[in-house]
Amino acid sequence: MKRVALTVMLGLLASAHAQKVQVPVPIGVALAQTSNTALLGQEQVIGAKLAEKHINAHGGINGTPIKLVFQDAAGDENSAINAFQNLITKANVVAIVGPTLSQQAFAADPIAERAKVPVVGPSNTAKGIPQIGDYITRVSAPVAVVAPNAIKQALKIDPKIKKVAVLYAQNDAFSTSETGTFQDAAKAQGLNIATVQKFQTTDTDFTTQVTAVLNSGADLVIISGLAADGGNLVKQLRQLGYKGLIVGGNGLNTSNIFPVCQQYCDGVIIAQAYSPAQPSAANQLFVKEYRAQYKKDPPQFAAQAYAGVQVVADALRALDHQKKLSQWNLDDLRTALNKQILAGKYNTPLGEVRFDKEGEVLQKDFYVAQIKMQDAKNGSFVYLK
Ligand code: 1QQ
């Protein structure tokens, strides 16, 4: 009796290890589908789904379709951890694209690292993300590379700018990372930092911070926060009388802030790691497919999520050429996939993308856009360069 039980147990253990790769090939997607962070996550979900549709319409992985498995990672650490655990142990995904926030990545990525499951960060831009582990890469260029472009553009528009007010969400890892970059870049441009103000991503009333900005006499305001808080901050700055230029960071990089700051969003300058005008064939196809469905140009977060799914699919295709995916053990495939992701070169909507040995994205083109509002509801991002 005992021996039978032991044999069954060993059998179960062995089968867990010898798990085959499922068909269609499950790729995990852990993004913010709910919470305030969904203002950013919604665009990513659209991008990921477009990639799935495009890849499967073009033969999937050498004839085998992929299937995205979505787990809502919301906007907090615990939801991201749960989403990762479900994808890894229940859905048996080959890799994960997610989470939305760096704050969540620092909590959830170590789970994937321990399970040896590759993670492609679609929007994690804080310093230190690829260094979380060997299985962590990102297609989202870091703040250090992207953010300074916005300050340079602000100075082109208004060369007389001297004094800067900097505001950031102190409870968010990306925001604290980005403000460091912004402050260094401002100083490097010879600007004087007149005040540094902190807030929380959950704040809705910014009277204290705005008053400090107005008293500082700043002629440029730079905000590092997320969409809801950032949008409200922009609105209250204008309502209380701030007249100068505003640079917003990556957390404000969505038309989903338009309902928050309405006509006051007008003029906000935001650096971009993506442009619909990027001339590669991969991008022009993506733009065409996005426009056909949504009647507007794709935003950065959609393009990056698309690129994240594409990187996984392209790497799977290379491995499938060596040995059909259905022949692989899941554990072996996850490890081989991670190596292949790091080794490959990808023609994505972001242009050509590669990774350095730590998993940091190597990408060529960066841009800056400015929000133009037609009225309180309708607006667009106008590219400046
Ligand atoms: C990060 C970010 C966010 C603004 C992405 C949505 O860049 O958390 O790293």
Image (cartoon, rainbow, N blue to C red):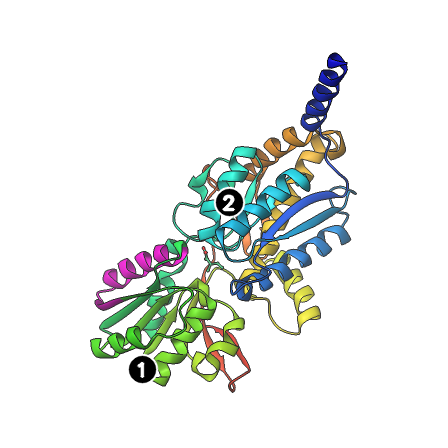
Q: Amino acid at mark 2?
A: Ala
Which residues fall within the magenta stretch?
174-196
Percent x, y for residue 266? Answer: 44, 80
The crowding category of the residue bearing disc 2, from other C-alpha atoms within 10 Å (few below 14, some 14 to 19, many at least 20), is many
Percent x, y for residue 175? Answer: 38, 59
Name the residue carrying label 1: 242
Residue 180 visible to the viewer: yes
Residue found at x 48% / y 67%: 253
The first of marks 1 and 2 along the sequence is 2
Residue found at x 48% / y 81%: 262
Q: Nearer the viewer, mark 1 or mark 2?
A: 2
Vertical order, 348 against 343 (above or below): below
| Residue 164 shown in magenta | no
Q: Is mark 1 within 8 Å of ligand 1?
A: no
Q: CA distance from mark 1 to mark 2?
A: 39 Å
Quadrant the N terminus occupies: top right
Q: Seen in the image, is 130 located left or right of residue 346?
A: left
Q: Which mark is residue 368?
A: none
Q: Is mark 2 within 8 Å of ligand 1?
A: no
Residue 135 visible to the viewer: no
Percent x, y for residue 354? Answer: 52, 45
Percent x, y for residue 75? Answer: 51, 58
Main SS, magenta residues: helix
Figure quadrant of residue 290: bottom right
Q: Seen in the image, is 45 located left or right of residue 377?
A: right
Q: Are marks 1 and 2 in contact (CB under 8 Å)?
A: no
Residue found at x 40% / y 69%: 203
Q: Amino acid at mark 1?
A: Tyr
Name the residue carrying label 2: 108
